[in-house]
Amino acid sequence: MGSGKSTVGKELKSKLDYSFIDLDSYIEKSSGRAIPEIFTTDGETVFRAMEQRCLTEILTETDANAHLIISLGGGTLTTPACAEMIRNSTLCFYLRAEVQTLMNNLEGTTDRRPLLQGQELKLSIITLMSERSPLYMSTAHHVIDIDGLTFPEVADRIANIVNAGNIH
Protein backbone atom coordinates (compact mmCIF):
# COMPACT_ATOMS: atom_id res chain seq x y z
CA MET A 1 0.00 0.00 0.00
CA GLY A 2 1.39 3.34 -1.05
CA SER A 3 4.28 2.11 -3.16
CA GLY A 4 2.66 3.44 -6.33
CA LYS A 5 1.76 0.11 -7.93
CA SER A 6 -1.20 1.49 -9.86
CA THR A 7 0.58 4.68 -10.93
CA VAL A 8 3.70 2.76 -11.99
CA GLY A 9 1.51 0.23 -13.82
CA LYS A 10 -0.09 3.01 -15.86
CA GLU A 11 3.35 4.44 -16.64
CA LEU A 12 4.54 1.01 -17.75
CA LYS A 13 1.50 0.57 -19.96
CA SER A 14 2.63 3.43 -22.16
CA LYS A 15 6.35 2.67 -21.94
CA LEU A 16 5.96 -0.99 -22.92
CA ASP A 17 2.71 -0.74 -24.92
CA TYR A 18 1.16 -3.45 -22.72
CA SER A 19 -2.39 -3.75 -21.44
CA PHE A 20 -2.94 -2.75 -17.82
CA ILE A 21 -5.32 -4.11 -15.18
CA ASP A 22 -5.57 -2.76 -11.66
CA LEU A 23 -6.81 -5.71 -9.60
CA ASP A 24 -8.65 -3.51 -7.08
CA SER A 25 -10.51 -1.70 -9.89
CA TYR A 26 -11.29 -5.06 -11.50
CA ILE A 27 -12.78 -6.31 -8.21
CA GLU A 28 -14.87 -3.15 -7.84
CA LYS A 29 -16.17 -3.42 -11.39
CA SER A 30 -16.85 -7.15 -11.02
CA SER A 31 -18.70 -6.77 -7.71
CA GLY A 32 -20.34 -3.42 -8.39
CA ARG A 33 -19.09 -2.19 -5.00
CA ALA A 34 -16.19 -0.16 -3.67
CA ILE A 35 -13.52 -2.05 -1.75
CA PRO A 36 -14.11 -0.16 1.53
CA GLU A 37 -17.79 -1.15 1.28
CA ILE A 38 -16.87 -4.82 0.73
CA PHE A 39 -14.59 -4.74 3.79
CA THR A 40 -17.24 -3.03 5.92
CA THR A 41 -20.15 -5.20 4.81
CA ASP A 42 -18.55 -8.60 4.25
CA GLY A 43 -15.14 -8.47 5.93
CA GLU A 44 -11.61 -9.14 4.76
CA THR A 45 -12.08 -12.91 4.34
CA VAL A 46 -14.85 -12.42 1.76
CA PHE A 47 -12.81 -9.71 0.04
CA ARG A 48 -9.75 -12.00 -0.21
CA ALA A 49 -11.90 -14.74 -1.76
CA MET A 50 -13.22 -12.25 -4.33
CA GLU A 51 -9.68 -11.07 -4.97
CA GLN A 52 -8.49 -14.65 -5.60
CA ARG A 53 -11.40 -15.34 -7.95
CA CYS A 54 -10.75 -12.15 -9.91
CA LEU A 55 -7.00 -12.81 -10.15
CA THR A 56 -7.72 -16.33 -11.37
CA GLU A 57 -10.07 -14.91 -14.03
CA ILE A 58 -7.47 -12.42 -15.20
CA LEU A 59 -4.70 -15.00 -15.42
CA THR A 60 -6.77 -17.76 -17.02
CA GLU A 61 -8.62 -15.54 -19.50
CA THR A 62 -5.50 -13.78 -20.71
CA ASP A 63 -3.72 -15.21 -23.72
CA ALA A 64 -0.37 -16.68 -22.64
CA ASN A 65 1.38 -14.44 -25.18
CA ALA A 66 -0.46 -11.28 -24.12
CA HIS A 67 1.47 -8.34 -22.81
CA LEU A 68 -0.27 -7.54 -19.55
CA ILE A 69 0.62 -5.53 -16.46
CA ILE A 70 -1.37 -6.33 -13.32
CA SER A 71 -1.26 -4.02 -10.33
CA LEU A 72 -2.04 -6.11 -7.28
CA GLY A 73 -3.56 -4.90 -4.04
CA GLY A 74 -1.12 -4.68 -1.15
CA GLY A 75 -2.66 -7.73 0.54
CA THR A 76 -3.14 -9.96 -2.50
CA LEU A 77 -0.10 -12.09 -1.69
CA THR A 78 -1.40 -12.82 1.82
CA THR A 79 -3.59 -15.43 0.17
CA PRO A 80 -1.24 -18.37 -0.51
CA ALA A 81 -3.05 -19.38 -3.72
CA CYS A 82 -2.65 -15.85 -5.08
CA ALA A 83 1.04 -15.75 -4.18
CA GLU A 84 1.54 -19.09 -5.93
CA MET A 85 -0.29 -17.92 -9.07
CA ILE A 86 1.75 -14.73 -9.22
CA ARG A 87 5.07 -16.49 -8.58
CA ASN A 88 4.42 -19.21 -11.18
CA SER A 89 2.51 -17.31 -13.86
CA THR A 90 3.98 -13.82 -13.95
CA LEU A 91 7.12 -11.77 -13.67
CA CYS A 92 6.59 -10.13 -10.28
CA PHE A 93 8.18 -6.88 -9.11
CA TYR A 94 8.19 -5.84 -5.45
CA LEU A 95 8.21 -2.05 -5.16
CA ARG A 96 9.98 -1.84 -1.81
CA ALA A 97 9.91 1.36 0.22
CA GLU A 98 10.88 2.63 3.63
CA VAL A 99 8.12 3.49 6.09
CA GLN A 100 8.57 7.26 5.60
CA THR A 101 8.14 6.96 1.82
CA LEU A 102 4.95 4.96 2.29
CA MET A 103 3.67 7.46 4.86
CA ASN A 104 4.29 10.35 2.45
CA ASN A 105 2.54 8.51 -0.38
CA LEU A 106 -0.46 7.47 1.77
CA GLU A 107 -1.05 10.82 3.43
CA GLY A 108 -4.64 11.87 2.86
CA THR A 109 -5.79 8.53 1.42
CA THR A 110 -6.45 6.47 4.55
CA ASP A 111 -10.22 6.93 4.29
CA ARG A 112 -10.16 4.77 1.12
CA ARG A 113 -7.92 2.10 2.66
CA PRO A 114 -9.78 -0.22 5.06
CA LEU A 115 -6.68 -1.77 6.60
CA LEU A 116 -5.41 1.65 7.66
CA GLN A 117 -8.55 2.53 9.61
CA GLY A 118 -8.43 2.88 13.37
CA GLN A 119 -4.67 3.09 13.88
CA GLU A 120 -2.01 5.71 13.58
CA LEU A 121 -0.64 5.62 10.01
CA LYS A 122 2.99 4.87 10.89
CA LEU A 123 2.04 2.00 13.20
CA SER A 124 -0.31 0.56 10.57
CA ILE A 125 2.42 0.64 7.92
CA ILE A 126 5.03 -0.91 10.22
CA THR A 127 2.62 -3.68 11.23
CA LEU A 128 1.55 -4.47 7.65
CA MET A 129 5.11 -4.40 6.33
CA SER A 130 6.40 -6.72 9.03
CA GLU A 131 3.69 -9.21 8.07
CA ARG A 132 3.88 -8.77 4.31
CA SER A 133 7.49 -8.08 3.40
CA PRO A 134 8.54 -11.75 3.71
CA LEU A 135 5.64 -12.72 1.40
CA TYR A 136 6.64 -10.06 -1.12
CA MET A 137 10.27 -11.17 -1.02
CA SER A 138 9.42 -14.85 -1.51
CA THR A 139 7.07 -14.10 -4.43
CA ALA A 140 8.89 -11.35 -6.32
CA HIS A 141 11.30 -12.09 -9.12
CA HIS A 142 12.75 -8.57 -8.85
CA VAL A 143 12.88 -6.01 -6.05
CA ILE A 144 12.90 -2.32 -6.94
CA ASP A 145 13.81 0.03 -4.09
CA ILE A 146 11.64 3.08 -4.78
CA ASP A 147 12.84 5.50 -2.08
CA GLY A 148 13.88 8.79 -3.68
CA LEU A 149 12.54 7.79 -7.11
CA THR A 150 9.62 9.25 -8.99
CA PHE A 151 6.98 6.86 -10.29
CA PRO A 152 8.18 7.37 -13.90
CA GLU A 153 11.72 6.48 -12.76
CA VAL A 154 10.41 3.29 -11.13
CA ALA A 155 8.57 2.45 -14.34
CA ASP A 156 11.78 3.07 -16.33
CA ARG A 157 13.69 0.61 -14.13
CA ILE A 158 11.06 -2.07 -14.60
CA ALA A 159 10.83 -1.42 -18.35
CA ASN A 160 14.62 -1.75 -18.62
CA ILE A 161 14.51 -5.14 -16.86
CA VAL A 162 11.65 -6.35 -19.05
CA ASN A 163 13.31 -5.12 -22.25
CA ALA A 164 16.74 -6.49 -21.31
CA GLY A 165 15.26 -9.91 -20.67
CA ASN A 166 13.09 -9.82 -23.77
CA ILE A 167 10.26 -11.00 -21.52
CA HIS A 168 6.83 -11.29 -23.12
Image (cartoon, grey):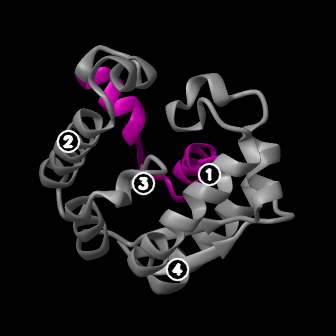
Crowding near pointer 4: few (<14 within 10 Å), some, many (20+)?
some
Principal SS element in the magenta part? helix
Residue 158, by quadrant, is bottom right
Query: Is residue 58 placed above or below 109 in the rendered structure?
Result: below
Q: Disc 2 designates what residue?
A: 49
The disc, 4 or 3, on the residue closer to the chain's N-terminal end is: 3
Which quadrant: the C terminus?
bottom left
| Residue under the point 57% across and 24% down | 112
Is residue 107 rendered magenta in the image? no
Tag 2: amino acid: Ala
The disc, 1 or 4, on the residue closer to the chain's N-terminal end is: 1
Residue 31, by quadrant, is top left
Q: Disc 4 designates what residue?
A: 142
Is residue 5 rendered magenta in the image? yes
State left or right for residue 148 relative to residue 145: right
Q: Which mark is residue 69?
A: 3
Q: How many marks?
A: 4
Q: CA distance from mark 2 to mark 4?
A: 26 Å
Residue 144's spot in the image, x, y percent?
A: 64, 73
Q: Nearer the viewer, residue 32 or 129?
A: 129
Mark 2 vs mark 3: in front: 2
Tag 1: amino acid: Val
